[in-house]
Image (tube, coloured by chain):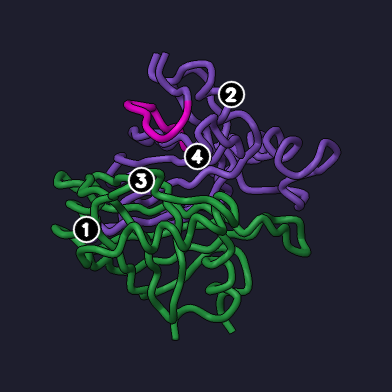
Chain colours: A purple, B green
Amino acid sequence: MILNDAARTALNSSRLAHLVTLNPDGSPQVSVVWVKAVGDELQMGHLGDGQKIRNLRRDPRCAVSIETGVRNDIGLDEYLIVHGRGEITPGGAPELLQELAHGYLGPDVTFPPMPDPPPGNIVRVHAERVGGVGPWTD
Amino acid sequence: MILNDAARTALNSSRLAHLVTLNPDGSPQVSVVWVKAVGDELQMGHLGDGQKIRNLRRDPRCAVSIETGVRNDIGLDEYLIVHGRGEITPGGAPELLQELAHGYLGPDVTFPPMPDPPPGNIVRVHAERVGGVGPWTD
């Protein structure tokens, strides 16, 4: 496994994740997203077909960073960086967003806030290496 | 100006910033850093000569993202993305880090925690465009 239990816990704590993809000219593009982790896979839901989806279809290399909100014993703020490759699978975005909304917005929230949301896409980031400040390697 | 007052305030609030640079193979590299903003320039101090410094010397294209901790009127968490170009100027890192440490660690903290820190480098990111969720355009 690339992600240990501490890393998976950080990624499943309903904190915002910063997803970096690569634009056609190679420059970096950042989106702030909701995330969950299952095994070594990070999952994110997107209703649309925006720049980050188009970027990952063209070049799967990406990175995800997340703050844990924990300050370690020597006074530094913990954060996790996951480098990996993104895969796009069509559909399923409303269901994943609804599941994540319970943690990110509130237990009773209905999300997306529309009657017939588009199926969208799920981004799956296959973790390849981790970095940052925290107990991310056993 | 690219950065309006709200964006500059967000960048000067002692919240962690996610700095994205480009590795030699074009893949994204993320570091979580302390930041301040002066005009349209973001400033970060680095004691060493690490990957992000080498990356910016080779390819100045970069991005910085930061969460504000504010939830907007429709329930979404605000965040700011700054895309720009990085410039490295040698020296001055201990002084900038000490200034930032008062906000990031505590008003009485001495940082770097060593008697004779190396002069390091200052990264200056010249903002070119902003994005995200928040009042970043007037």
* SS category of the residue bearing label 4: loop
Relative to A9, is B131 above or below? below
Rounded to the nearest angstrom, the CA distance separating label 2 from label 1 is: 32 Å
Q: Chain of mark 2?
A: A
Return the residue at label 1: B56
* SS category of the residue bearing label 3: strand
* SS category of the residue bearing label 1: helix
> Split into 4 quadrants, where in the image is the C terminus of chain B?
bottom right
**Numbered badge on residue A56:** none
Return the residue at label 4: A76
Determine if marks 2 and 1 fall on one subunit. Answer: no
Tell me where the magenta segment starts and ends, as one range: A122-134
Please identify, in this view, whether the residue under mark 4 or under mark 2 is nearer the observer.
Answer: 4
Work out whether residue A81 or residue A34 is closer to the camera in this orientation and state it.
A81
Indicate the position of residue B128 as horizontal and vertical percent values. 36, 75
Determine if marks 4 and 2 fall on one subunit. Answer: yes
Return the residue at label 3: B30
Badge 3 amino acid: Val
Indicate the position of residue B11 as horizontal and vertical percent values. 52, 66
Marks 2 & 3, CB-CB < 8 Å contact: no
Rounded to the nearest angstrom, the CA distance separating label 2 from label 3 is: 20 Å
Residue occupying the point 53% across, 74% down: B8
